[in-house]
Every structure is written in C-alpha cells, then in structure tokens.
Image (tube, rainbow, N blue to C red):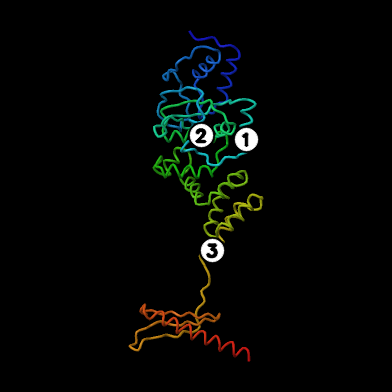
C-alpha cells in the first residue's frame, strides 16, 4: 500500500516536477517516490515499464535500465566528454554557489555510468551545478542517476536542456560539433544536422569558427548578446585574410555597436581583394648576363629603378662558392669606398 503524502511532501514533489528541465524531466512515478522518501516512507522500486515516455522526439536513445535520485560524492563526478558548452562565466558560477548557500540544491544533476569511467559518474547535464558545489567545498551533491545512455545521449540531453535555458551559444556549438564529428559520434554534418535540427550548411558555418584562436572565441562568447553568427563568421574571414590584430579591431567595433554584419562583410571582401592583388611587382630596368667560356649560362645581375640590384648565379661548385663570395665582397667594398670618396669631394 502506498504511503500517504503530507502537505510538505506534495509541495516538494511539485517543485521537483516543475523545476527539472525537459531534457531530464522526472516521470510521475519518480516524483512520488521522492516525495515518499521525504515523508519517511520506505523506498519504492521503480518499474521502467510503468514509466511514461517523456523525451523530446528528436532524442533517440537506449531504454533506461535504472533511474534513481541519490546523493553522490562530488569527487566521483567527471565532466561530460561531449559537453555542448565550452564557455562558462565565473560570475554565474559564484551566483549559483550563493544560491546553494541560501536555498540549497533545487535540481539534481543528471549523471550516468560509463565503462570508460569505472567507479565514476559522468555528467549529462549539470556542469554549472557541480562547479558551484566544488567552489563551495561540498562533499556530496544530489544526482539523478541514469543508465543505458550512449555518447549521442550525453550530447543531446545536455544540448536540448541548454537550448531551453538559452545558455547555448554558437561558440559552444562550434567546439562541441567539431569534437562530435572528429570522434565519429556522428558520421557527417548531415547526420549531426538531423540530430540537432539544423541545416548542414549552418553546421558547416558554425564549425568554421573553430579556426579562430580560443581567446577570440572566448571573448565572443562573453559578448554573445552583441556578437552573432553573422558577425563571428565574417570576423573569421577577416582573421584568415588579414591576421589577428585586424580581426580583434573589428570584434571590438562589433562589441561597441559600431560594426554591423554588412559592414563586416564589406571589410572581409576588401581584405580578400587586397590579398588577391598582392604586392605590385617591380620589373628590372636592365640586366647583365654571365656565361662560362664554353657558353653555358652562369646567371645574371638585375638592376631595378628603385636602387636594388639582384645577383643570381647557378652551377657553382661548393669548393668555389666561398672564393667567389670573397671576390664579390671585395668588389662591392671597393665600389662603396669609391662612392664615399666621390661624395666627399
């Protein structure tokens, strides 16, 4: 016979059901079990067959063989190897740590067990919470423990949860998507695009940002309200064509609200044009050719209008190169001395 829930337990159950994100929402039976636990009732085993499906349609994963909320050691928790987020604000971690102090941990982290991490719990969703707990020196943390998850689940659950909380940025996506493809979690951009609901062209454009230095990506992520994908992609083109200092200049212009996407496109096109033209070549005005007595060409001396002279020789035996260099040096030094004398008079 099920234990009767008191008012506090019902409120607790309602808070759990309301606050857990869609990516990790507890089934109704789980919520009742948590409430019964708080009410002092004996633990009730969960029957996976009675657990209603609550996952988004785009997340395809293996059946869950176990589902339980418990306290686990913070030391036994490791980060998600396919964490969709790469950039975290120290300020938000501090704010969450303060919230732990005043309100406690409201939402458990979502973890799983993987053979690659024996004896440890791998975070599926909750990196900010574990960082806040570590910053406080907490020994334990509430965790929703799931089994039967694979690498795609590790990414997709966290990805959708972050999207719902509006914490995901294209800069996080860039690094995460590249790793997913590099590790063959998804075979190509088409399969990845189907999983995350994005066009492969968008995926390609986002992944292209990974060619930027990490410090530029970090700065863009910190200013994500001002720097969108259109800004970032054109800054990437400017970086490729003109270097870091020019790219940094335009990024600052974007942050200050002085450069639109259209302005960046014009700047990137201008840099492309300058690169294609390249430096103008200066043609020589005259040249002196050198031949051996048997008529074989040795090289030439080119004289340019801007005062330069270029000597190019070939076919000189290694044993003769040093002697020739000394003679050329002597001739040039004598010529320079004569020039000084004539200028002095």
**Mark 3 or mark 2, earlier in chain:** 2
Closest to the observer: 243 or 276? Answer: 243
Q: Position of residue 330 (x, y in %)?
A: 48, 85
Report the residue marked by disc 1: 94
Q: Position of residue 34 (x, y in %)?
A: 52, 18
Q: Specify few, some or many for label 2: CA neighbours under 10 Å numbering under 14, 14-19, or 20 or more.
A: many
Residue at the extreme left:
294
161 w.r.t. 250: above or below: above
Residue at the extreme top:
1
Q: CA distance from mark 1 to mark 2?
A: 24 Å
Please name the residue shown 62% across and 43% down the image. 225
- Say which quarter of the image contains residue 65: top left
Element class at badge 1: helix
Q: Position of residue 35 (x, y in %)?
A: 54, 16
Report the residue marked by disc 2: 160
140 w.r.t. 261: above or below: above
- Say which quarter of the image contains residue 61: top left
Q: Specify few, some or many for label 3: CA neighbours under 10 Å numbering under 14, 14-19, or 20 or more.
A: few
Element class at badge 2: helix
Q: Tell me whether the residue at label 1 lies in contact with that at label 2, contact meaning CB atoms closer than 8 angstroms.
A: no
Q: CA distance from mark 1 to mark 3?
A: 47 Å
Q: Position of residue 173 (x, y in %)?
A: 51, 42
Q: Tell me whether the residue at label 1 lies in contact with that at label 3, contact meaning CB atoms closer than 8 angstroms.
A: no
As drawn, the label of residue 34 is none
Quarter of the image with the C terminus is bottom right
Please name the residue shown 50% across and 52% down the image. 211
20 w.r.t. 80: above or below: above
Can you tell which of label 3 and label 2 is closer to the viewer? 2
As drawn, the label of residue 273 is 3
**Mark 1 or mark 2, earlier in chain:** 1
Element class at badge 3: helix
């Amino acid at each position: 016979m099920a234990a009767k829930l008191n008012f506090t337990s019902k409120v607790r159950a309602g808070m759990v059901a309301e606050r857990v994100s869609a990516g990790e929402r507890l089934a109704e039976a789980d919520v009742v079990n948590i409430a019964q636990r708080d009410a002092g009732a004996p633990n009730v085993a969960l029957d996976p067959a009675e657990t209603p499906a609550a996952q988004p349609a785009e997340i395809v994963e293996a059946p869950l063989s176990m589902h339980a909320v418990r306290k686990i050691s913070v030391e036994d928790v490791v980060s998600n190897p396919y964490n969709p987020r790469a950039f975290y604000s120290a300020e938000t971690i501090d704010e969450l740590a303060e919230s732990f102090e005043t309100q406690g941990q409201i939402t458990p982290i979502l973890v799983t067990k993987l053979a690659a991490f024996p004896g440890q719990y791998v975070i599926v969703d909750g990196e900010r919470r574990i960082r806040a707990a570590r910053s406080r020196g907490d020994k334990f943390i509430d965790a929703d423990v799931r089994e039967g998850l694979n690498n795609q689940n590790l990414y997709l659950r966290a990805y959708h949860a972050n999207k719902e909380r509006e914490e995901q940025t294209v800069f996080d996506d860039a690094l995460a998507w590249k790793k997913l493809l590099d590790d063959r979690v998804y075979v190509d951009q088409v399969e990845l695009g189907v999983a995350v609901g994005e066009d492969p062209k968008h995926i390609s454009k986002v992944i292209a940002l990974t060619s930027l230095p990490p410090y530029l990506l970090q700065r863009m992520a910190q200013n994500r309200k001002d720097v969108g994908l259109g800004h970032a992609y054109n800054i990437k083109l400017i970086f490729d064509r003109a270097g870091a200092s020019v790219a940094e200049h335009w990024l600052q212009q974007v942050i200050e609200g002085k450069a639109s996407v259209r302005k960046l496109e014009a700047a990137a096109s201008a840099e492309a044009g300058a690169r294609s033209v390249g430096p103008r070549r200066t043609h020589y005005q005259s040249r002196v050719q050198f031949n051996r007595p048997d008529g074989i060409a040795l090289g030439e001396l080119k004289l340019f209008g801007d005062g330069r002279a270029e000597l190019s020789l070939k076919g000189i035996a290694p044993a003769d190169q040093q002697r020739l260099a000394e003679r050329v040096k002597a001739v040039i030094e004598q010529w320079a001395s004569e020039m000084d004398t004539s200028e002095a008079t």
